[in-house]
Image (cartoon, rainbow, N blue to C red):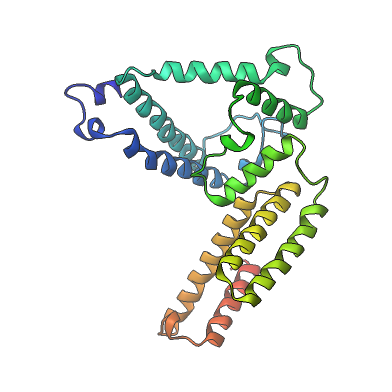
Amino acid sequence: MQRLLGDGGCPWDREQSLNDLKRYVVEEAHEVCDAIDGLGPDAARSVTSPGAVQAGPESEAVRDLREELGDLALQVVFQSEIAAHFGWFTVDDVVAAIVDKLHRRHPHVFGDQKVSGTREVLANWEKIKQAEKRDRGLLDGVPRGLPSLLAAARMGEKASRVGFDWPDPSGPRARVDDELAELDEAIASGDRAAMQHELGDVLFTVVNLARKLGLDADAALGETNRTFRRRFNAVEAQARAAGTTVDACSPETLDAYWNEAKRRERDGA
């Protein structure tokens, strides 16, 4: 990157600003997530999982993940080199800072603090973070540009670490019913602002229910999106096979095509 950004380097690279590169960070992060999804069941394993450490031929999915992580790492190096040009910091400073942070926030590993398990580790992490950044609120660490579903999950996690949470999933589950009732009232009133407000409350509560159940709301919605895409593609294919298009089909025909797509999935077709 020093060569690419230096005199006689790449014209495109030299013209990029930090603002220009923001979208690439997001895109590359999503591509890493897509590569992780491509690992299938392996993506759910941790280093403590049985058989987690094993040698074997590198699969295409593993190669994809390696490549996408490299692309994401490039963004860290690229932006660090721009910052170095301005005299702010270098990529070495970036790495040194995260090493220091990992030491500070893992006193149970690098120090003599004792912890009972993961829950206490997370609680200690938040306490240490708050001590480091006394002028910041607990939720200030959640990026304002984060997609709303992910932001809701992260805010719930952070609040939970300091004890602001339901004791078990029954709390948010009951709250889902309450919020749905309030949404029904808003719909009946015809007040669109009230409807949007109450719909937001429903979604926020559902995300917290997922968190209390140990589920990833974003992953769950992503799976449903993929299912809908797959089945709708099948509906379109059936319409084409019948010599027509989906917009020319009756609701009854589309419903029959949809049910056929579901049946074929169940049968493994």
159 is higher (above) or lower (below) than 183:
above
Of residues 174 and 40, the one nearer the viewer is 174
258 is higher (above) or lower (below) than 211:
below
Q: Quadrant of residue 57?
A: top right
Q: Quadrant of residue 198?
A: bottom right
Which residue is most to the left?
A: 8
In the image: residue 163, left or right of residue 56: right
Of residues 253 and 75, the one nearer the viewer is 75
Q: Position of residue 264 (x, y in %)?
A: 60, 72
Of residues 10 and 167, the one nearer the viewer is 167
Q: Position of residue 202 (x, y in %)?
A: 67, 60
For the point 61% across and 77% down, the residue is 259
Q: Position of residue 182 (x, y in %)?
A: 70, 67
46 is higher (above) or lower (below) than 147:
above
191 is higher (above) or lower (below) than 16:
below
Q: Quadrant of the C terminus?
A: bottom right
Q: Quadrant of residue 52?
A: top right
Q: Quadrant of the N terminus?
A: top left
For the point 71% across and 63% down, the residue is 179
Q: Position of residue 37 (x, y in %)?
A: 55, 47
Of residues 155 and 10, the one nearer the viewer is 155
In the image: residue 193, left or right of residue 3: right
In the image: residue 218, left or right of residue 244: right
Q: How many marks?
A: 0
For the point 75% across and 40% down, the residue is 164
For the point 74% across and 34% down, the residue is 162
In the image: residue 181, left or right of residue 137: right
